[in-house]
Image (cartoon, grey):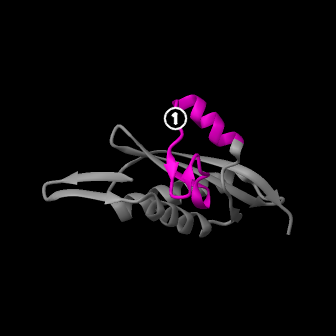
Amino acid sequence: MITKVNPYGHISLTNDYFSGLVEQAAKQCYGIAAMGQAPAESVVRSALRTGSISEGARGPASLPPKGVTVTQEGGKLVIALHIKVGFGLNISTITQSITHRVKDEVELATGLKVARIDVYVDDIIAD
């Protein structure tokens, strides 16, 4: 859950909200074949790097829903996005398009600044 403080109180946005928002923004980008969940290897690597595995709605050490994880660092958002792309497409162009689109959509919808977006291409899907 991400919390924003304003003069009138606290606004809390759930991880499900962010997952849906980011998924919808990313799916509108050319070249996205599907959204994917982070592989277990990625979850373990992240846990070793940060020292913890957060509990999700599906219990401890759950994989992020819809392939999206959102955390907050220094008052800014850090978004990790797992995607699958179509075969034969320029992956660099696709990921650049996604980062710009997701950043704009999230900042416009929430008023929170995005520090960075990490895009992981988990698979290439042939048509």
Furthest toward the front, the residue is 59
The quarter in which the C terminus is drawn is bottom right
The residue closer to the viewer here, 98 or 4, is 4
Q: Residue at x 57, y 29 (%)?
A: 49
Q: Secondary structure at mark 1?
A: loop
Residue 16, percent from left and from top: 47, 63
Q: Residue at x 37, y 65 (%)?
A: 109
Q: Amino acid at mark 1?
A: Ser
Q: Which residues are magenta?
A: 41-69
Q: Give the side of residue 121 with respect to residue 87, left or right.
A: left
Q: Is residue 53 magenta?
A: yes
Crowdedness near tag 1: few (<14), some (14–19) or many (≥20) residues, C-alpha within 10 Å: few
The image quarter containing residue 93 is bottom right
The image quarter containing residue 124 is bottom right
Q: Is residue 124 above or below residue 117?
A: below
The residue closer to the viewer here, 95 or 64, is 64
Q: Which residue is mark 1?
A: 52
Q: Give the side of residue 62 with respect to residue 116, left or right.
A: right
User: How many labels sit on residues?
Assistant: 1
